[in-house]
Amino acid sequence: MRSLRLLIAAHKLGAGLGHTPAVEPRGVQFLRAVHTSSPPGPPVNTSSTTVARFEDAFAKDQRDKASFVQVLDLFCGRDVRRRGHIELIEAALRWMPHFGVEKDVEVYNKLLDVFPKEVFIPQNFIQSMFLHYPRQQECAVRVLDQMEYYGVTPNKHTLFLLVQTFGKLSHPVKKYQRLLYWFPRFKHTNPYPAPLHLIADPVALSKVCLERIAADRDAQLTVYQLPSSEVRDDGTVLEHAHLVGIQSPDQMCLLADHDPEHPVIVEGPFPLWLRKTCVYYYVLRAEPTAKIKEELDPERCFYYPLQLSLDLERDLGDDLSFDVDEVEEGPVYAMCMTGSGDEKTLGKWIQCLQETNPVLGQLPVLFRLTSGPQEVSPPVQEESESPKEDTRPSEEEEETRPYRRMEQ
């Protein structure tokens, strides 16, 4: 009770004296500034008008590196505090592919130079322990993420800008260190890298894709047909699509040993992605159940075999539950790429293959084709209410319905 009375008396005494500002020590003022008020820095403007103004600044007729850098220079020279720099950088990241500078490290350094310098660096241990100025650091990390997406390796100038802006222990600097750690290790891991600039010519692009799929130095590329147009007598124009094929000597030997009782199948199209371009190819293969005809050696003996297959690389402790060599998908005899995946064009490919593979003249060929990217599958027609006669095919016709047969 005594302490309570003392507190009430002190409260009345303070109310009678009035609110007189007390002079606090300099150290107390510094601590209050750290924990209560935000330190001085550039104000962040998140209004829609600012974003729209930046979007209009990049919407130009002339879109090249010089005009893109000009927008950044105008923004940096307009205001010393660079208000709205986050909105500018986010808009610039979206417009970089339109200007063709998404793979230029100098432009990314120019974007990081937009941040005000020595403002977002933590001044004490508590600020460095937490995410100091989180929105600005996340924006810088997004810039580095886009560099990672397009495969742009940062340089020493990038590190200098990040340290000058956010400090050595910031998240953008850690992201920079991870990029420099992993990029050199993954740069040469792919034995068949895709070219940086894809060729616009469909024939040349088909050659690059088929060589990438085959991965055989002895495989022979053949251009069976070039893209051309033919004007008929009635005035109609007939377009001929390109036709490029590849076949290795081993595939020719496998095709020569194919059993004539089993057909070969033209199957496709199968997609292949080269960076942002998707192309389609077709294969000539056999069924997994098809057996290759074997000629018995008259000198073969069951007690003394001619060869022994010993796998000395395996050990008793190896896991033999799954073996890639035991997966049967059927041998592939040839591959091709064409601009038109119809039976007429693919039939011409089979006729051209007969020049180097005469056995195709004795084999039945089945076409197992699906609708390509430009081909639209016909919609399934709903059954009408009027009854129809039962015209269900037999079991043999139902099995061979998806296939079409062409005997050469």
Image (cartoon, grey):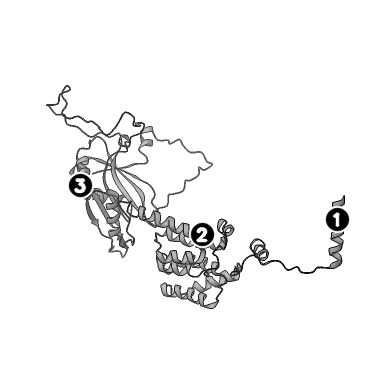
Near mark 3 (Cα within 10 A), the count class, few <14, some 14-19 or many ≥20, is some
| 68 to 292, vertically: above or below | below
Q: Give residue 6's mark.
A: 1
Q: Which residue is mark 2?
A: 170
Mark 1 to mark 3 CA distance (whole Å): 111 Å
Residue at x 41%, y 60% (from the top left corner) = 150
Residue 345 in sight here: no
The outermost residue toward the left is 299
Q: Amino acid at mark 1?
A: Leu
Q: Position of residue 3 (x, y in %)?
A: 84, 52
Q: Which residue is mark 3?
A: 354
Q: Nearer the viewer, residue 41 or 62?
A: 41
Q: Where is the C terminus found, in terms of image quarters?
A: top left
Near mark 2 (Cα within 10 A), the count class, few <14, some 14-19 or many ≥20, is many
Q: Position of residue 149 (x, y in %)?
A: 43, 58
CB under 8 Å between discs 3 and 2: no
Mark with earlier residue (2, 1): 1
Mark with earlier residue (1, 3): 1
Mark 3 to mark 2 CA distance (whole Å): 66 Å
Near mark 1 (Cα within 10 A), the count class, few <14, some 14-19 or many ≥20, is few
Q: Amino acid at mark 3?
A: Gln
Q: Position of residue 371 (x, y in %)?
A: 39, 49
Q: Nearer the viewer, residue 368 or 91?
A: 91
Q: Amino acid at mark 2?
A: Ser
Residue at x 75%, y 68% (from the top left corner) = 22
| Mark closer to the observer (3, 2) | 2
